[in-house]
């Protein structure tokens, strides 16, 4: 163990599979996120490969979801990091636990817990970043591979730094950040709080005075929190991009710095930067959402909405599953999954859910790897894994009972299956709230729901046809677009490769200071001019008036005198 740790501390590059395929197209470097983020991005990777591009996926040995030991059509570049996947996964589980605590502690307590945890997450990210960026062999190897574009998920914070180091154009894949902080502050996407409800929230785009007030306050809080979180990173970003500080006189790092020096000749451009500034250099933002789900809001030309890019037509089910589904007869089935991160529930919860299932005539396909609940009835079957998309596309599927992760939600929209939502954390409450407002879902609270609530919700969604109709409407909107989302995502990656970036789509707002952005300088100037001219005008009037007054009054008096006489 000791030896292993020491060995992994000396950061080494391991290049595993090296399938050198014929490359007619571009050369794409991919830095994936974890969990569902990677499952989503894989679809882009597969489509890039289908179009004869060459793809390299860069992962650390601590990756939780990316199975880099398995041979793939693309190549992996794996770098050693002194962390273990289970440590990272442990943090995610901790986050889920904080969110799912019941009875709920106070907002402040939860906020502090999350802040504390995010501190740990940042620490781990820093380790991963160092393992990647202070690794001269890795950087040299990546440079030699001559990529055309970097596609990354901001789950790993310093991916944009790697793009700077390798001098590559960037495509980001993102769902949304808390309060749109990243999009607004780094991507310059406007989100006026008067009609754009802050995510995640339970508000719609029709806001009353108090809701708008609340919206403004929450926006401000998220902005401040994001600013505070990024300040500690600004220093790191500056260090990496500013050769001198980064160079620690160890041979490896000097080599890295030589590479930086190539990007920034003679160090003249080495000046302090911020995380937002670096991230804001992205050429294209691929947002994993679309107007079926979103409220209309202003956008920048380099934001592309590609929600549902992973959805496909349903394939036939495995034989045993198909038999189970067919055995449901006319009642059909309900599909239940809480996603990849929540595999077990407390016995109380799973019993409560199972007993609600026992009282519906439908069959239930439940993705669950925890302990089998005692109240499980014969109409419910547990599976470690389910072909979710194929099940949702099955004509017998009546409802989808889900935590509301973006991937599953889009599969439901794609196939037009109404939902019962059990939001747990992250974007899930927001996702499901949108579905509820659009009349396509009933949303429950995992902490307070009873077996009867769940039963009622399932019956409502299955037997009240308005839910199915609303979902079909969303589904029509989802399908009725000029280009399929996957094609669109790949098009923009190809565009960036062909044109060496898409800087023509980046607004100049990136170059402005805050007072220039809000035109405070112009307003101050105009105000000064108005004040000055007003002042001059009044002074002139007074002057003229006095002049006239002095001259005319004696005249009149004189005239009056003459009349009287
Ligand atoms: C990390 O690097 C060491 C030293 O070369 C190597 O022996 C080890 O296999 C690497 N670890 C992993 C998980 O690849
Ligand atoms: C990819 O390359 C293969 C073989 O070179 C060719 O047959 C195929 O048409 C190409 N596909 C695309 C989408 O260009
Ligand atoms: C789920 O399982 C993990 C370990 O397998 C355990 O630590 C955790 O407490 C379980 N969660 C619940 C809610 O039972
Ligand atoms: C179905 O649901 C809608 C929306 O919640 C509701 O307005 C309507 O009354 C319900 N219909 C029946 C028959 O319960």
Image (cartoon, rainbow, N blue to C red):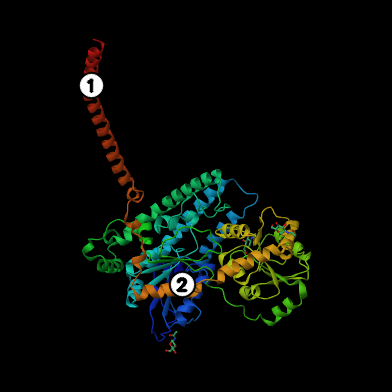
Taking 490 as reference, is 539 left or right?
A: left
Give residue 172's position: percent from left, percent from top.
Answer: 43, 66
What crowding class fits label 1: few (fewer than 14 Cα within 10 Å), some (14-19), or many (20 or more)?
Answer: few
Nearest the camera: 560 or 50?
560
Q: Which quadrant would residue 472 be assigned to in this image?
A: bottom right
* Residue at x 32%, y 54% (from the top left corner): 512
Quadrant containing ligand 3 reads bottom right
Which quarter of the image is occupied by the C terminus?
top left
Nearest the camera: 565 or 408?
565
* Residue at x 23%, y 62% (from the top left corner): 267
Task: Give the residue number, with chain letter if any, for mark 2.
Answer: 489
Above or below, 533 against 354 in this view is: above
Q: Is residue 211 visible?
A: yes
Nearest the camera: 547 or 388?
547
Above or below, 261 against 75 in this view is: above
Q: Is residue 78 visible?
A: no
> Which residue is situated farthest in the top direction here?
565
**Of pointers 1 and 2, the one earlier in the residue sequence:** 2
Task: Give the residue number, with chain letter if any, for mark 1.
Answer: 552
Give residue 209's position: percent from left, percent from top.
Answer: 54, 43
Give residue 508's position: percent from left, percent from top.
Answer: 33, 58
Determine whether the residue tagged by mark 1 lies in a helix, strand or loop: helix
């Amino acid at each position: 163990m000791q030896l292993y740790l020491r060995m992994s501390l000396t950061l080494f590059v391991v290049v595993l599979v090296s399938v050198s395929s014929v490359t007619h197209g571009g050369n794409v470097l991919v830095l994936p996120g974890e969990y569902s983020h990677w499952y989503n991005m894989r679809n882009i990777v597969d489509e890039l490969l289908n179009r004869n591009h060459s793809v390299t996926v860069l992962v650390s040995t601590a990756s939780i979801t990316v199975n880099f030991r398995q041979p793939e059509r693309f190549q992996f570049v794996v770098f050693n990091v002194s962390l273990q996947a289970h440590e990272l996964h442990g943090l995610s589980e901790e986050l889920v636990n904080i969110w799912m605590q019941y009875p709920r502690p106070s907002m402040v307590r939860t906020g502090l817990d999350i802040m504390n945890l995010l501190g740990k997450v940042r620490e781990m990210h820093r380790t991963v970043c160092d393992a990647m960026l202070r690794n001269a062999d890795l950087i040299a190897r990546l440079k030699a591979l001559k990529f055309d574009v970097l596609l990354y998920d901001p789950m790993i914070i310093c991916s944009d730094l790697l793009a700077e180091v390798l001098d590559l154009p960037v495509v980001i894949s993102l769902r949304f950040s808390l309060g749109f902080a990243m999009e607004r502050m780094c991507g310059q996407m406007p989100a006026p709080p008067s009609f754009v409800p802050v995510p995640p929230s339970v508000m719609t785009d029709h806001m009353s005075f108090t809701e708008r007030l609340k919206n403004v306050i929450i926006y401000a809080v998220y902005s401040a929190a994001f600013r505070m979180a990024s300040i500690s990173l600004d220093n790191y970003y500056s260090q990496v991009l500013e050769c001198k500080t980064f160079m620690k006189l160890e041979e490896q790092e000097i080599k890295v710095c030589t590479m930086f020096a190539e990007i920034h000749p003679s160090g003249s451009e080495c000046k302090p930067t911020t995380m937002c500034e670096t991230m804001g250099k992205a050429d294209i933002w691929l947002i994993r959402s679309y107007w079926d789900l979103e409220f209309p809001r202003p956008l920048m030309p380099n934001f592309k909405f590609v929600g549902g890019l992973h959805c496909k037509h349903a394939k036939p089910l495995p034989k045993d599953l198909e038999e189970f589904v067919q055995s449901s007869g006319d009642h059909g089935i309900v599909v239940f999954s809480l996603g990849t991160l929540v595999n077990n529930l407390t016995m109380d919860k799973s019993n409560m859910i199972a007993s609600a299932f026992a009282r519906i005539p439908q069959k239930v396909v439940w993705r669950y790897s925890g302990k089998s609940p005692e109240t499980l009835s014969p109409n419910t079957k547990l599976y470690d894994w389910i072909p979710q998309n194929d099940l949702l596309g099955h004509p017998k599927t009546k409802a989808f009972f889900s935590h509301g992760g973006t991937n599953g939600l889009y599969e439901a929209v794609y196939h037009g299956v109404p939902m019962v939502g059990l939001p747990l954390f992250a974007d899930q409450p927001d996702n499901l709230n949108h579905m509820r407002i659009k009349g396509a879902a009933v949303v429950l609270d995992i902490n307070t729901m009873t077996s009867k609530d769940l039963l009622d919700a399932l019956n409502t969604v299955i037997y009240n046809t308005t839910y199915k109709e609303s979902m079909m409407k969303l589904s029509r909107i989802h399908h009725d677009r000029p280009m399929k989302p996957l094609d669109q995502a790949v098009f923009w990656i190809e565009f960036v490769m062909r044109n060496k970036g898409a800087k023509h789509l980046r607004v100049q707002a990136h170059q402005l200071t805050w007072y220039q952005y809000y035109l405070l300088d112009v307003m101050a100037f105009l105000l000064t001019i108005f004040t000055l001219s007003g002042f001059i005008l009044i002074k002139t009037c007074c002057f003229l008036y006095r002049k006239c007054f002095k001259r005319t009054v004696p005249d009149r008096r004189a005239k009056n005198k003459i009349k009287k006489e």
